[in-house]
Image (spheres, helix red, strand yellow):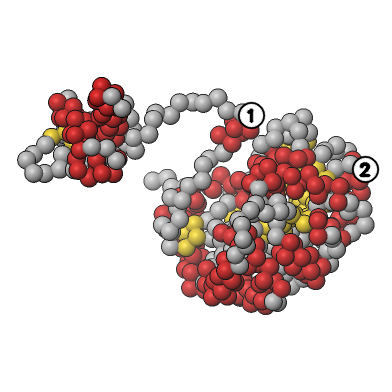
Amino acid sequence: MSKNNAARSQGMGALQIYEEIKRQILGGVFGSAGQLPSSRALAHELGVSRTTVTAAYEQLLAEGFIEVQQGARPRVACAVVGPSRNKTGSKRSVRTRLSAYGEHVRKIPPWSDKELGRLVVDFRHGDLASSDFPVTLWKRLMNKAMDRRPERLSYDDPRGSRRLRMALQGYLWRARTIRCDLDQIIIVNGSQQGLDLCARLLLDATDRFVIENPCYAMARQIFSGTGASPVSIPVDDDGLNTDLLAEIDARLAYVTPSHQFPLGGVMPISRRHQLLRWATRRNANVIEDDYDSEYRYDINPVAPLHGLENSDNVIYLGTISKTLSPTLRIGYLVVPPGLQDVFATAKELADRHSPVAEQEALAALIESGAYESHLRRVRRLNHERREILLNALRHRFGDKVAIEGADAGLHIVVWFKDLPGSLEAALLEKAHRAGVGVHTISRLYDQGAHGVRTDRIGLVMGYAALDARRIERGIQLLAEAIKQVRFARKPVPPT
Ligand SMILES: Cc1ncc(COP(=O)(O)O)c(C=O)c1O
């Protein structure tokens, strides 16, 4: 390099360092009066000469961004205030033009953890007790899976580990009488990815889809994201009211027939046949979300849609989020033979395949029989939790509440007969203040459709993450919150 070039390159380096540090100072990265690295440390870190860093620091000093005292590291000058950047130093947000899907997503409130850990008791549905998870066994199986070292690390089969698919094939036959070929099973990152693949592959913006009302909101959101229109069908004690399907032309129906989410009805066989006949006639697919069928307490198992006559259009969806942990993100689809290749390719396009070691560990867990013994254990534990919750509710509220969906699953719906829907916001606020997290059913309804109940407040109460003490305390806090709501509602007598 010529002398001139070397000098220029040194000068440019100093300019870049100056620009970057100025950006960081204005962005508040060092805080007010925060210390910058010494010129020696920064030069070493950036792989440039100390003279280059000193030149950058001198420029910052001359412009008043930093202050330097003999023998100390430079500091951000007290007077510096970031004029155009926010605290984290990131750029101001510009409203970017999004796709139709992006605009749909933009309307959904973003995930927030601000409630987590702040409440004394949270009846949020979907969480499990970490003490139920077989930690020691899982660690051992994960270590084993990690120890198996192939010569090269390559992308795997998008359908998932063959070993896991074989283990699930046997499990589905034993537990759910589902018979399928290995190639029909596709491992996904939780049911949510299964629903996402169904939405992408089966729906166009001009289509309609049938959905239960009330329903699993994540399913409605994901199908609506395609631009397709929901046809909300009311649910009763027997799940989706299939009598109302006859005239409906839709591309697919999403159902939870084993334990309707959230109301808990189990769809009887006559309705199952009616639904399948409708799907065959309309050439529509039925997505059967079998999210928590492992938990049945006082009822006999009902065969899934997948195993019935005329079930060629059924896409079965299972998950380990209710049996092991929602954090593992493992679910599975059983797709009709005609769709197995397109689903496998869509999965590959989405994320190549699900993480391999977890799949191998799960396969080993199922093969050894430990998964099914774990299921027996957690079924018993959750049965006990359910009893404690039901007793606590009966004790505190007596016949002021009506309970639905307690025969199966990990949540119940509690209707407060004397609390009209108009008091919902007040109840949420009072309960929150008291430290108990409760979740209303109203947000799971398509509010525009008929059959929405506003005459009373309904709560969806999950109990699988709570021990006896917390369940009882939670109901006590809820009772106090309800008392306050009732009291605030009482008209003040004229003086
Ligand atoms: C109806 C329904 N389906 C599926 C799931 C599980 O989803 P995932 O497997 O994505 O964790 C839930 C979780 O709460 C659910 O309520």
Q: Residue at x 62, y 62 (%)?
A: 150
Packing grade of label 2 (10 A; few <14, some 14-19, many >=20) is: few
**Camera-side residue: 177 or 168?**
168
Question: Please, what is the three-letter code of the amino acid marked with disc 1?
Answer: Ala
Residue 281: mark in rendering:
2
Residue 476, visible in the rendered structure: yes
Res 379 visible: no
Residue drawn at 49 percent across, 54 percent down:
486
Q: Position of residue 459 (x, y in %)?
A: 59, 55
Q: Is mark 1 within 8 Å of ligand 1?
A: no
Q: Secondary structure at mark 2?
A: helix
Q: Position of residue 126 (x, y in %)?
A: 59, 59
Q: Is residue 494 above or below residue 331?
A: above
Q: Earlier in the sequence, mark 1 or mark 2?
A: 1
Is 3 or 344 nearer to us in this picture?
A: 3
Which is more toward the observer, 296 or 319?
Answer: 319
What SS does tag 1 mark?
Answer: helix
Distance from Cα at disc 1 to Cα at disc 2:
31 Å
- The residue carrying pointer 1 sits among few (fewer than 14), some (14 to 19) or many (20 or more) residues within 10 Å by Cα, namely few
The reply, left or right, for residue 152 in relation to residue 184 is: left
Q: Residue at the location (71% across, 73% down)?
A: 367
Callout 2: CB less than 8 Å from ligand 1:
no
Give percent across and percent down for residue 338: 86, 47
Marking on residue 100? 1
Question: For this view, does 218 lie left or right of residue 211?
Answer: left
The furthest residue to the front: 2
Q: Is residue 59 left or right of residue 344?
A: left
